Image (cartoon, grey):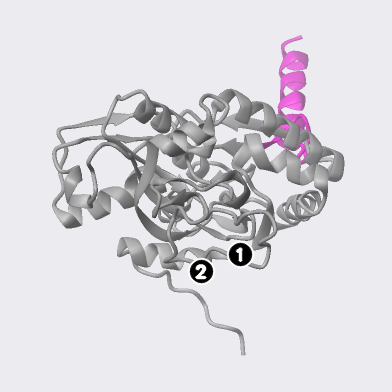
Amino acid sequence: MTFIVIGALLSISSYVFGAKLGTRERPIYMLLVPSTESSQLAIRGKQIAEALYDKTGLYIEVSLQSDYAAMVEAFASSDGDTFGFVTTDQYVRIYQLTKGDVTPRLAAVRHGYPYYFSRIYVPRDSGIDSLQDLNGKTWIYSDRGSTSGYVLPKMLFDRLGISFSNTVESGGHINSMVALLEGQGDFCTGYGNPPLPPSGCSNTAWKPGDDPELWIWDRWNNAPYRKELRGTCMDLRRAVRNIYDLDDVIRRIGVLAVIGPIPNDCLAFGPDFPSDVSDRIVAAVEEQLGTKEGKALWGEGFYGWTAVTEIDDSYYDSYRQLLGLPIPDRPGPTQ
């Protein structure tokens, strides 16, 4: 009897550990970072996993990480069964922890832009007109692992010798803007995507160096542009439009400064993830984002992706240079 029981257990164990990747017995894990509203993000993540299953037959389990640091650790310690959506700074940290054993495949594109910015948001009536005016104030940021919310602003503040009387770690980008609107601090930092031009100006595009509130805020009249002349705000203020009236938020909160451009977040595969399986997932994602339904799934309520572009590790070299990190040695082309 003892022999039979042990044999049964060994048989079950062998079945589980020998199971094919992407089955219920050995699922693929899709990691999400909590940069937006968590409950909605988890729901949308499960819908995307189901849509990927429909196209690939791969069973994918969604895992929403508790914070940015947890995302980095979970990704770096994974064992051939994990992919996910990592921020720019997270990707670079994961690369360092795994000694390059991480593979970025698709970078986010949002409304035609493969990059974004860190922005410093202040109340328009605060009297804060320059970066030096931030000295001694209370800084609201999302998480110490956030590229746009903390890492790059902290570098800038340290370089300029700016210090603060207090800091508030909000736990998320949306929370930071809410905290600013509710008077819990003097300014906040977070992401900012380029504004979109007004309807009928499709041949006009925002460029780095342009006013971050181009088409949004009429600086001559110190007021929002009239509706018929106004573009679409695509920064952190828009993220709270389901909580506050967007026009009111724009009237109350302005952009003091921008840092960047920063290469966008990406879909990456963790250590030892099999390339043939990652190819199937990448192809499915690209196919999804080529449809109206797919764009809706990946857009509002998720990470706001409207398209993707194929990348490799060199995509993040500009960010490494921004941080003062060395560019990895890479093998040259074969002769």
294, above or below 202, in the image: above
**Location of residue 251 in the rendering, given as x and y in whole percent from the top left corner:** 43, 37
Q: Is residue 17 left or right of residue 241?
A: right
The residue range painted magenta reads: 1-29
Residue that carries the numbered disc 1 in the rendered image? 311
**Location of residue 292 in the rendering, given as x and y in whole percent from the top left corner:** 81, 47
The label number, if any, that marks residue 314 in the structure image = 2
Callout 2: helix, strand or loop?
Answer: helix
Binning the other alpha carbons within 10 Å of mark 2 as few (below 14), some (14 to 19) or many (20 upward) gives few
Would residue 16 be counted in the magenta stretch? yes
Would residue 271 be counted in the magenta stretch? no
Give the residue type that dot 2 points to. Ser
Q: Is residue 170 visible?
A: no
Q: Residue furthest front?
A: 221
Tags 1 and 2 touching, CB below 8 Å: yes
For the residue pair 189 and 105, the one nearer the viewer reads as 189
Name the quarter where the N terminus is drawn. Answer: top right
**Location of residue 15 in the rendering, given as x and y in whole percent from the top left corner:** 77, 31
118, above or below 180, in the image: below
| Mark-to-mark CA distance, 1 and 2 | 8 Å
Binning the other alpha carbons within 10 Å of mark 1 as few (below 14), some (14 to 19) or many (20 upward) gives some
In which image quadrant can residue 298 be found? top right
